[in-house]
Amino acid sequence: MLSVSDSKSSVYHIIKPEQNIEDKMLTSVKQVLYMDNFEKLPLLCLRRKKQPVFSISPTLRKKEKKKKLEEKRIPKKGFLDVEKRNMEEQAETKFRLSVCKPAFHSVKDKVMIFQKKEEEMYHAVQPIHSLVDCAPQLKAVNHPVNIEKRIFAKMYGAVRLRPFYIIDKAYRDSKRCEVQAKKISGVMQMQIAKDEADCFIKSFHEEKKNSVQKRCKEEDIRIQEALHQHQLRRSEFIEKTRKRHAQFLENKNQKASEYSLIQNFSIQHASLTQSLFKVDRWRKSEETIKERKSIVKENKEDAEKWKELIKNFQEHRQLMLRKENLSEKLVLDSIVSQMTNERLQQAKAKVAAVKDHQANMKNYDQTAIELQCGKACIINSSV
């Protein structure tokens, strides 16, 4: 069996029967062509070795891909239907069941890796082909030949190699047929293994589906039991809460009555204490008023005594001041009289001095006038 890829590479993988199941799953994406007559297939020359290459139209590839995808999706649809039914039952019971989806491993990533490897091989082999095609053909060189070789060529040169060529060709054809037979047997083995794997996968999906259904039924039974237990617990809890509520109401009423009694007693006690406090305050206020009145009387008496003392002291002081004033007046009068006498004498002395001065000045003026008149007469006489 030969695999055909979608890439442009000229190197293709030959799948052997010794490969593992993982290689089978990986190569399941590649398309396989089954043909009885291998002589009609095109030949590709890779390093001057002829190898058969398969080609297929893209429409067939798409159809096979669609078929494989449908085969893979068949068990999933049943599983989804079971999940939908379970979800409807869960919605009725108001519970959710956590069901994990089956793991689905896609082969696209590995196919892309194989395609990249094929492209790398193609790019690696292409320069070799270009070198082989572009290599110049060597021309035959005619070396000088001896006479003996010429004689041998004349005698034995007429021998034909056609039968040997035919035998060699037949031997090569037989080998090629053996190789093709081996490949066909390998392809058949791979096909059988693939069918067995498909059957195993289908049985595995069916077993998984049955196990999921059984699990769902068991979980439904378990959920119903849990619901029943939950309802019982809820009814017990409701009864307990009702009893507790009744006890709470009784305790509340009892506490309210006790609180009302305590409140009335506290009000009466507060009123009595307030009245007693008022009486005590009235008594204390009266006592303080009496004490204050007595203190005021004592203060008034002391003030009157002090006033009388002050009056006596002031009268005595006034008398003493009068005596002092009289003595001072006498002394001052004597001093003033002495001062007036002294001033009069000084004034008289000053008046006498002024009069003497005025008399002297008059005499000086008369002498000066006389001198001036004499000078004037002298001047006139000289003129």
Image (tube, grey):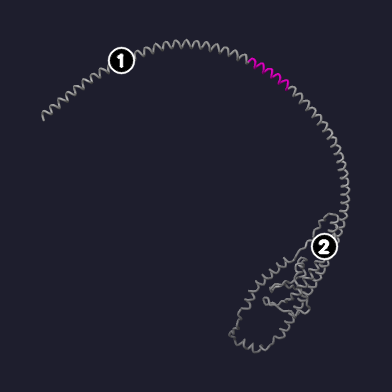
Q: Which mark is residue 34?
A: none
Asked if residue 286 is among those painted magenta in the image, a careful observer would answer: yes
> Which stretch did the figure color magenta?
281-298
Name the residue carrying label 1: 348
Q: From the image, tell me which residue sits under label 2.
A: 80
Q: Secondary structure at mark 2?
A: helix
- Left or right of 64 in this view: 226: right
Q: x%, y% of residue 227?
A: 87, 51
Q: Position of residue 2 (x, y in %)?
A: 75, 73
Q: Nearer the viewer, residue 244 or 310?
A: 310
Residue closer to the observer: 79 or 118: 79
Q: Is residue 341 left or right of residue 40?
A: left
Q: Residue at x 79, y 78 (%)?
A: 36
Residue type at numbered disc 2 = Leu
Three-letter residue code for mark 1: Lys
Task: Report how far apart the C-alphas of labels 2 and 1 lie in the structure.
Answer: 161 Å
Which of the 4 quarters of the picture holds residue 377? top left
Q: Is residue 201 magenta?
A: no
Given residues 79 and 151, the one toward you in this image is 79
Residue displayed at 73% across by 20% down = 283
Check the image and report above or below for 71 versus 369.
below
Q: Residue 60 appears at what percent x and percent y?
A: 76, 75
Disc 2 crowd rating (10 Å Cα; few below 14, some 14-19, many 20+) is few
Taking 62 as reference, is 141 left or right?
A: left
Quarter location, residue 200? bottom right
